[in-house]
Image (cartoon, rainbow, N blue to C red):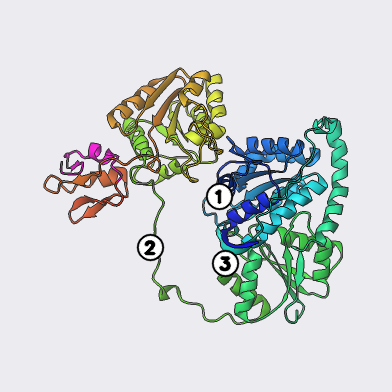
Amino acid sequence: MALELLMGNQAIALGAIRAGVQVVCGYPGTPSTEVLETIAQKKCEDLYVEWSVNEKSAMEIAAGAAYAGKRSLVTMKQMGLNVASDPLMCLSYVGVKAGMVVLVADDPGPISSQTEQDTRYYGGYSKVPVFDPSSPAEAYRMIGDAFDFSEKHGLPVLLRPTTRVCHACESIEVDGERNLHLQEGFVKDKKWVIFPRLSYQAHLGIGKREALMQKELSCYEGNRIEESGESRGKGIAAGGISYAYVKDALTQLDTGARLLKISTPYPFPEQKALEFLKDLKEVLVVEELDPVIERELIFLCGKYHLPVTIKGKLTGHTAQAGENSVDLIKGQLGEFLGKQTGAVKEEGDLPALPERPPTLCAGCPHRASFYAVKKAMSGKKAVFCGDIGCYTLGNAQPLDMVDTCLCMGAGLTMAQGIRRAQPDTTVFGFIGDSTFFHTGISGILDAVYNKTSMVAVILDNSTTAMTGHQPHPGTGVTMMGVDSQPVSIPAVLKGLGVKHIQVVDPLELDQAIEAVKRAASEEEVSAIVFKSPCIAIAASGKRRQVDRDVCTGCRLCIKELGCPALVKDGDKVGIDRNLCYGCGLCEKVCPFHAIGGEGGC
């Protein structure tokens, strides 16, 4: 055993390795990404790791490995589970042989997501058990429990850490020993084929299975009652990171209470909860994000006619959205327990934090791509549909070039819907290279097949940039470090039937603008591949500087581009050398030729 300071995602990764995982698949998405990356860095000889093209593929590959007797792990964020929900629902009926854990990292806030959806509901909906860790150390141990539980019951298991568990750090006793659970390979059996009659029979057994797991989980060490001081008829129930916040808040309030810790929200540990509710009059439930534990306790009170009032999100006693915090929970507990929480600082006591709106990096080629389209379509009726990635930031001023953004791949398909509703409008669908492979190909195929006139703009920066520069099919390297044949986006477009394809460097601004005009003039599907590498993987160019004698102070460069490296310098414009990456876009935009490379203009 060795004591290591680990981030939560690293702890989960090491826990999975210790539990004998042999096949790991996933799609990058904050806050889950580092789990798979940590496992890949360990390079165990008997362990296969891949970034799959999307979460559905990852889920199915992991399921196949589990069918064949290898413990498998699939990683994603909460939005990715929507993509992978089809196989997950079916796996609840079919089951698995070896242990299979589906790690889904939820993002309260949300900090880096479109929604605050709660994966615990997916557990109840799909009838798949959910394990909910409250700290990195518990996550390290819990993923092993999840694998064991999965293998025992022949079901995949959801592990649901949230952002603060994923990214917090804790000193953890790590066992370096790897515990392989070897099983025979794939054995042919009709149970692996999901026919309606077999599904009906499987569904009949789900209720019995749930009752069995519920009793077992009532004895699980993660579900427990903690007594500290007199309950006075009041209790607190919590799960996940909120449990840790409750413990801290109680310490700060210098009080105790009967506390129920829920680590498996589905199946809910009914017997343990009934033991907790005995002799109580009121319970405050603290959780992220939805009232999952709260609803379960209300149900139990009704089922067993218990005279207990359950308070929480549904009653307005806890916040209904966003992240919890120790300070927030301290106030809620203080009111519930009748303890003073101290004077609350007035808003004016502290200076307001400066606003830092998200923006494209200085030198990002996406800025040039958006600007080229904007200039080419100036004065014309056009709608610009965006997608999920760095380029979502194209919605900010002054570019203002993302009119819609829904989910992965929707930029290409929503554009088609708008075109069908408004035939007089030129519609653009923007999508990144990684997202193109994730869910963009089907959107292009739909447009070609149904003869929908639109312009598909693929922003190819040669990486999965927003989540940390992971490889994808177009990069020519796998997560195992193996060279692979890069998949050509223009070749894919041609294979799908797109006739009008242009590949342009967006930093060649004049050429890029002309390419957009040509694409927009077509009466069928046309595509532009704006190809220029992300600044994080490319060498920088010559940093630009402003000739103050030539600069008129019009600030057109700032107003048009919004590049963070362009700053006000008195009545002129300056360039922050620490931010400039030498893309040269500002040089092309300046009408007075006041911007040039190092050494003068």
Residue 48 place in picture, x, y as percent = 63, 39
Q: Is residue 135 above or below residue 513?
A: below
Q: Is residue 481 above or below residue 78?
A: above
Alpha carbon separation for disc pair 3 and 2? 21 Å
Q: Which mark is residue 321?
A: none
Locate the C terminus and report the quarter of the image it occupies.
Answer: top left
N-terminal label among 1 and 3: 1
N-terminal label among 2 and 1: 1
Give the residue pinned by disc 1.
Answer: 34
Q: Which mark is residue 325?
A: 3
Give the residue pinned by disc 2.
Answer: 354
Q: Is residue 13 above or below residue 185?
A: below
- Which residue: 80% across, 58% down? 217
Please indicate whether residue 236 sits to the left or right of residue 591 in the image: right
- Mark 1 is on which residue type? Glu
N-terminal label among 3 and 2: 3
